[in-house]
Image (cartoon, rainbow, N blue to C red):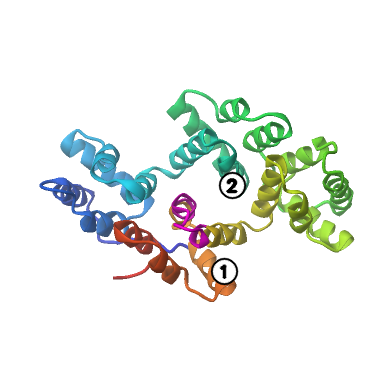
């Protein structure tokens, strides 16, 4: 479930005018920006963008970029984009950041549905005049390239059918591949990039049953290089993306100075989907409410905006 508390009383023109007023004069009225945009659904935000363009012949996203700065600017900018366009931007930033960003490519390719991944690839074409797989390939090599290009290019079957015999066979193949460390990863890449998520979950369960350890724990022992780290992320996202996102949030808030990029990414991309469940997992795991951790670690308008998206009422 979503955490966003969107208003039902919504006039795109009135919102556009109020935001324009917030930009006038000395400095920006961030409180108004947060109060409006932090309580509007994706459809309402696109209506505001259209109304603002018609009223002032200006793209509100570009205006927000110039009016805001730092973490709040990045968070609001990403929030205002349509989801597919936002994921295209996140993917591009991740590709440019090198090794640190591969997990974001894996997230997009494995958490979204096949249709959604296809839509992100189209948005990437439109925005960057190149293909997502082209850019991923240009910035990676070897097994990591094969895995990432395979994941972003994949159009998986989305049904619930399971082949139990195949799950056993492929659990054994994955076990051998992980055990060998520097072995042949071709089969592991094939399995991860072509099978349906339902089939893969059955394979991961079979792995645990047959080998007495979860595949992610086994991989952690070997996850010293970028390929194994990306493989580990893919398996975690396919197995239980909400648990994966809880850990991203936990790590983001635990770091010295906190990892605002990771925090913003999870909150902005999941606030209208399943952030409520992720928040509950966070509380179960840490015995602290996510809102309290955010309030303690963050500050200023960025903190207010993130708390608003988390559903915290003033």
What segment is highlighted magenta in the picture?
A: 252-266
> Residue 107, labelled with which disc?
2
> In which quadrant of the rendered view does residue 34 lie?
bottom left
Q: Which x, y percent locates residue 109?
A: 60, 42
Image quarter of the C terminus: bottom left
Characterize the local packing of mark 2: few (<14), some (14-19) or many (20 or more) Cα atoms within 10 angstroms: many
Write down the residue under mark 1.
281
> In which quadrant of the rendered view does residue 184 lie?
top right
- Describe the element under mark 1 as helix, strand or loop: helix
Residue at image coords 38%, 43%: 81
- 152 to 247, vertically: above or below: above
Name the side, left or right, on which 15 lies relative to 276.
left
Q: Residue 262 magenta-drawn?
A: yes
Name the side, left or right, on which 196 lies relative to 59.
right
Q: Residue 96 magenta-drawn?
A: no
Q: Which x, y percent locates residue 229?
A: 68, 46
- The residue closer to the viewer here, 22 or 220, is 220
């Amino acid at each position: 479930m979503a955490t966003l508390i969107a208003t039902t009383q919504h006039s795109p023109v009135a919102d556009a005018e109020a935001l324009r007023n917030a930009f006038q004069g000395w400095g920006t009225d961030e409180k108004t920006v947060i109060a409006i945009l932090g309580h509007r659904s994706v459809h309402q935000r696109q209506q505001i963008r259209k109304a603002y363009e018609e009223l002032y012949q200006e793209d509100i996203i570009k205006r927000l970029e110039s009016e805001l700065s730092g973490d709040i600017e990045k968070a609001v900018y990403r929030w205002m984009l349509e989801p597919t366009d936002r994921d295209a931007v996140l993917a591009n930033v991740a590709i440019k950041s090198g090794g640190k960003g591969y997990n974001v490519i894996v997230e997009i390719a494995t958490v979204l549905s096949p249709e959604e991944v296809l839509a992100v690839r189209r948005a990437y074409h439109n925005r960057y005049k190149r293909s997502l797989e082209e850019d991923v390939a240009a910035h990676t090599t070897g097994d990591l390239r094969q895995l990432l290009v395979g994941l972003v290019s994949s159009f998986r079957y989305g049904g619930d059918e399971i082949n139990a015999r195949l799950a056993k066979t492929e659990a054994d193949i994955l076990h051998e591949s992980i055990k060998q460390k520097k072995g042949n990863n071709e089969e592991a890449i094939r399995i991860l990039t072509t099978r349906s998520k339902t089939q893969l979950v059955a394979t991961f369960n079979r792995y645990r049953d047959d080998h007495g350890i979860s595949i992610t724990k086994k991989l952690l022992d070997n996850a010293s290089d970028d390929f194994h780290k990306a493989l580990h992320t893919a398996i975690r996202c396919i197995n239980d993306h909400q648990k994966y996102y809880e850990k991203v949030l936990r790590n983001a808030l635990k770091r010295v100075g906190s990892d605002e990029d990771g925090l913003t990414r999870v909150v902005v991309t999941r606030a209208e989907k399943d952030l409520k469940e992720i928040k509950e997992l966070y509380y179960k795991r840490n015995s602290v409410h996510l809102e309290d951790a955010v309030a303690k670690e963050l500050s200023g308008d960025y903190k207010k905006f993130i708390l608003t998206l988390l559903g915290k009422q003033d």
